[in-house]
Image (cartoon, rainbow, N blue to C red):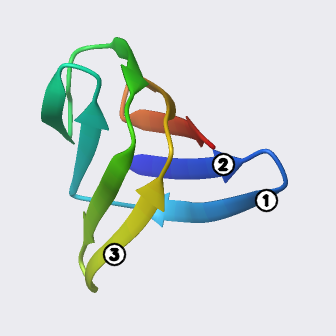
Amino acid sequence: MKVKITKPDATVFDGEAKLVQLPGTGGKFEILDNHAPIISSLAKGIVRIVTDEGEQTFDIRGGVVKSQQNDLMILVQ
């Protein structure tokens, strides 16, 4: 799936991922390929992205996520 993580001043990540783990306001959750459409708020925590090359993590202070048709947009602070 295509994943893009954007801060107000820059794009932090733009690429393909197999799994994305997010710190939701109600607890951690994961998004995989072909996930149902979702819009959710994010809490302070760590975004974990698993790609074919390995794993990356990003500290965030909160934000929102929108996922639809294997296109994941994460807007963070």
Is 66 left, or right, of 29 in this rendering? right
Q: Is residue 38 visible?
A: yes
The one nearer the camera, 14 or 76, is 76
Judging by the rendered image, the residue that carries numbered circle 2 is: 6
Q: Is residue 24 above or below residue 33?
A: above
Separation of residues labelled 3 and 1 (CA atoms): 17 Å
Q: Position of residue 62 (x, y in %)?
A: 49, 36
Q: Which residue is found at the position 22% from the left and 15% from the top?
A: 36
Q: Is residue 13 above or below residue 7?
A: below
Residue 39, by quadrant, is top left
Residues at badges 3 and 2 in contact (C-beta under 8 Å)? no
**Element assignment for label 3:** strand
Q: Position of residue 6 (x, y in %)?
A: 66, 48
Q: Which residue is found at the position 28% from the left and 86% from the top?
A: 53
Q: Which residue is found at the position 33% from the left and 75% from the top?
A: 56
Residues at badges 3 and 1 in contact (C-beta under 8 Å)? no
Q: Is residue 68 visible?
A: no
Judging by the rendered image, the residue that carries numbered circle 1 is: 10
Amino acid residing under circle 1: Ala
Residue 56 shows which numbered tag?
3
Query: Within 10 Å of the Cα at label 1, are there few (<14), some (14-19), or many (20+) other Cα atoms?
Result: few
Q: Position of residue 5 (x, y in %)?
A: 56, 51
First reached walking from the N terminus: tag 3 or tag 2: 2
